Amino acid sequence: MTTTVSTESIRNGVDTAQLFDTLDAVVGDPSLGRFQFRVSNEWVAGAHNRGTIRGFYGAGQEDTSRAESFVVEAGEPAVLCGLDTGPNPAELLLSALAACLTTSLVYVAAARKVSLTSVSSTVEGDMDVRGALGLSDEVRNGFERIRVHFHVEGHAPAEKLQQLVDRACQRSAVFDMVTNGVPVSVEADAA
Amino acid sequence: MTTTVSTESIRNGVDTAQLFDTLDAVVGDPSLGRFQFRVSNEWVAGAHNRGTIRGFYGAGQEDTSRAESFVVEAGEPAVLCGLDTGPNPAELLLSALAACLTTSLVYVAAARKVSLTSVSSTVEGDMDVRGALGLSDEVRNGFERIRVHFHVEGHAPAEKLQQLVDRACQRSAVFDMVTNGVPVSVEADAA
């Protein structure tokens, strides 16, 4: 694919010309919007396991543009019987949420011609681990609640920056999944 | 905390003596089960942002055992207007799910005295990006469905290994959150 990049079209590090071309292309052929993302995971030992991410399907074809795989190490801290080989899975979920809201916010700002100078956030999740440890059926396994706090700076009135955060929540893929849930099927072959 | 490690108590890389001590401690004082996990995220440019993970609260105190922070880079591939600076947020969510199911399975196996030799999985999520791109209100923003496939090998009959996968789903924190959803509050200050 040949892309002509005009530096004038770059806002917040997003090539808005490419972004609008992408939107036009998907409007013209909605089948281009169908994506499939994938992770392979391999157990290492104890709480240490490793996710590998590379290929995906999207925009009408298998995407092979990534030169290398991304690797996501997971673990548990000592207090949860691990060797701290990586973030624990619940922390990875919070990372996914923060990342998706941030990217959504930045893309929305670029499309609305708002130049941002700084975006940071903290995400906290409260969990009673008696659920996941199998010690209580009265508490859930996952977080009871998650709190996100954003700090946003940019060349727009505070009210407009707040609207970007609202719009990010309305369009974020991970915010949708974490708040509304997704059907998950699990199958296994064992030997 | 002084921990006596007996190599005889290690199964699947999990110190089962420590695991049962932990379970006993939380049964004795349920308040020790209250945890809070956290991520800080900083926008870099475009779809590139970076999560940082270190401290958390758990087992009755602020945990400061981690010597260093974990860093989770996020990005988007070229076709989604990014520079491929890391997995995209939806892929991070799949990573969290695979990691949590795997760790849950390994801990359950250790507790049930099943020695595992291999655990691997693939996780796929189907998404119509017209939702997240704001082009359609008829498709959701996130994955429509997620499929997990495990391959498990160990010193137990296939039926028993299958039961470990079922139990992992029943107790995994991230499986609970992704399938059932979590209340998320978002607030922002803007300047």
Image (cartoon, coloured by chain):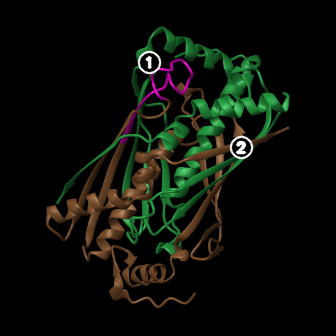
Chain colours: A brown, B green
Q: Chain of mark 1?
A: B
Residue B117 image point, x, y percent: 81, 36
Residue under the image location 57 percent in, 67 percent down: A35
Which residue occupies the foreground of this view, B12 or B186? B186
Which residue occupies the foreground of this view, A61 or A116? A61
Label at residue A187: 2
The kind of residue on which mark 2 rests is Glu
Query: Do circles 1 and 2 both sit on a common chain?
Result: no
Q: Is residue A54 visible?
A: yes
Q: Residue furthest top?
A: B28
Residue that badge 1 annotates: B32
The answer to whether A114 is drawn above or below residue A90 in the figure is below
Q: Quadrant of residue A145?
A: top left
Q: Quadrant of residue B3?
A: top right
> Which secondary structure is most common in the magenta stretch?
loop
Residue A31 image point, x, y percent: 55, 75
Q: Label 1's element?
A: helix
The residue segment tinted magenta is A124-140
The answer to whether A48 is drawn above or below residue B157 in the figure is below
**Quadrant placement of the C terminus of chain B:** bottom left
